[in-house]
Amino acid sequence: MTSFSLLAPAKLNLFLHINGRREDGYHELETLFTFLNYGDQLTFTLTETTAIEVTGDTFAIPLKDNLIYKAAVLLQKHCNSVFGAKINLTKILPMGGGVGGGSSDAASTLLALNKLWRCQLSLQELAQLGVQLGADVPVFINGKSALAQGIGEKLVDVELPQKWYCVVHPSEHVSTAKIFTHPDLKRDTPKLNGNWQQHTLGNDCEPLVKKLCPEVEKTLQWLLKYAPSKMTGTGSCCFVEFATQKEAQHVLENLPDSWDGFIASSVNISPAHTQLNAIHLSNEVTYK
Ligand SMILES: C[C@](O)(CO)[C@H](O)COP(=O)(O)OP(=O)(O)OC[C@H]1O[C@@H](n2ccc(N)nc2=O)[C@H](O)[C@@H]1O
Ligand SMILES: Nc1ncnc2c1ncn2[C@@H]1O[C@H](COP(=O)(O)OP(=O)(O)OP(=O)(O)O)[C@@H](O)[C@H]1O
């Protein structure tokens, strides 16, 4: 049997600026991405037919809409692969929470199947495929904390100090599409062109999301008791940053019952890449 597991880590947008709107509706961004040592768990097993099977915590997402399935089919077609795969998902990350779970699942799928099917695509080629699935997929393929421009796909790697985060998921869902199509979204922040200082910069989606979702406003206010709070992506998750695990744990222990949360440390290299590099497949292909 040829089978292995990979983490699909969460990301945080340490700041997020919107510089304008393109004709195709997508927005020009500047954002700082970090990865967390925390995420979904995916197991990939090589199969001898071309069928792609996704099992586990797939909830109500129809197979054809599942980003894991879409990523697998995209790679299979691109590489004319004669192989298939059974993919099992253990969902840990909140869906639609701004921590990029779906995009990360898609990226880990592309990375894993590229190896399992011996497609031998470069990270750049995988990122070009990945961006067709979502603007956040390339950063997970690139696997390094990065300053992103364009729609989020033009990446410059950065080294960030390791921190601990307490991430809170309020009991309210925010649709990314709804925020990006809303007339009140701030879309005119001037480009920084490399002059960024993460702690002084915020998230341009935050004022609108706070207005539309009182729970997000409440969460940000509550977190302020402990440290400066920010929202990630288009929400609804909010976070606070600390130097130590103990400080982050303290916030989590005091979290009101109606909110979910987790703590995690940041990493400059995506855990999916660290794991993938440690996997050595035997030359002999065996199926399940
Ligand atoms: C907000 C972020 O999470 C920041 O990291 C991402 O930009 C969103 O990335 P994502 O969820 O992978 O985005 P997609 O699945 O490509 O698009 C979701 C929705 O957001 C809009 N969208 C996304 C990215 C972007 N730069 N401009 C946009 O206007 C798209 O038009 C779409 O309606
Ligand atoms: N494997 C998957 N995991 C999570 N969501 C998925 C998956 N496949 C498809 N989706 C769809 O994608 C939507 C967005 O999911 P995701 O969890 O990535 O949002 P997010 O964390 O807000 O991402 P972002 O920060 O990139 O906007 C979900 O509401 C769900 O309908």
Image (cartoon, helix red, strand yellow):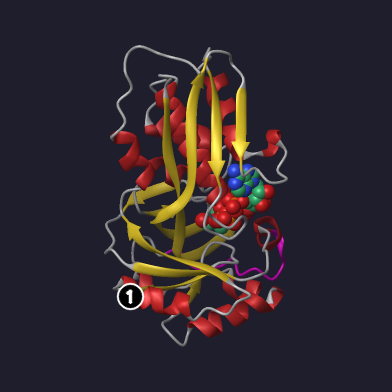
Q: Where is residue 269 in the image (x, y as percent from the top left)?
A: 31, 49
Q: Give the percent coordinates (x, y) of residue 30.
A: 46, 59
- Residue situated in front as seen by the camera: 109 or 75: 109
Quick one: quadrant of the N terminus?
Answer: top left
Q: In this view, does 284 lie above or below 194?
A: above
Does the magenta segment cover residue 182? yes
> x and y percent of residue 211 in the render?
68, 78
Magenta highlight range? 181-191
Q: Work out whether 46 lies above or below 59.
A: above
Question: Which type of secondary structure does the marked residue at label 1 adopt?
Answer: helix
**Residue at 34%, 35% in the rendered image:** 276
Front-most of residues 109 and 45: 45
Q: Residue at x 53, y 39 (%)?
A: 106
In the picture shown, does residue 267 fall above or below 4?
Answer: below
Tell whether position 28 is magenta. no
Q: In which quarter of the image is residue 206?
A: bottom right
| Count of numbered tags | 1
Residue at 61% x, 35% y is 55
Q: Residue furthest bottom?
A: 225
- Front residue of 155 and 36: 36
Q: What residue type is labelled 1?
A: Lys
Q: In this view, does 35 lie above or below 133?
A: below
Q: Mark 1 points at which residue?
A: 246
In this picture, residue 8 sits left or right of residue 132? left
**Mark 1 CB near ligand 2 (8 Å cut):** no
Query: What x and y, as percent, mark residue 146?
Result: 36, 53
Q: Report the residue at 45% width, 61% height from top.
A: 12
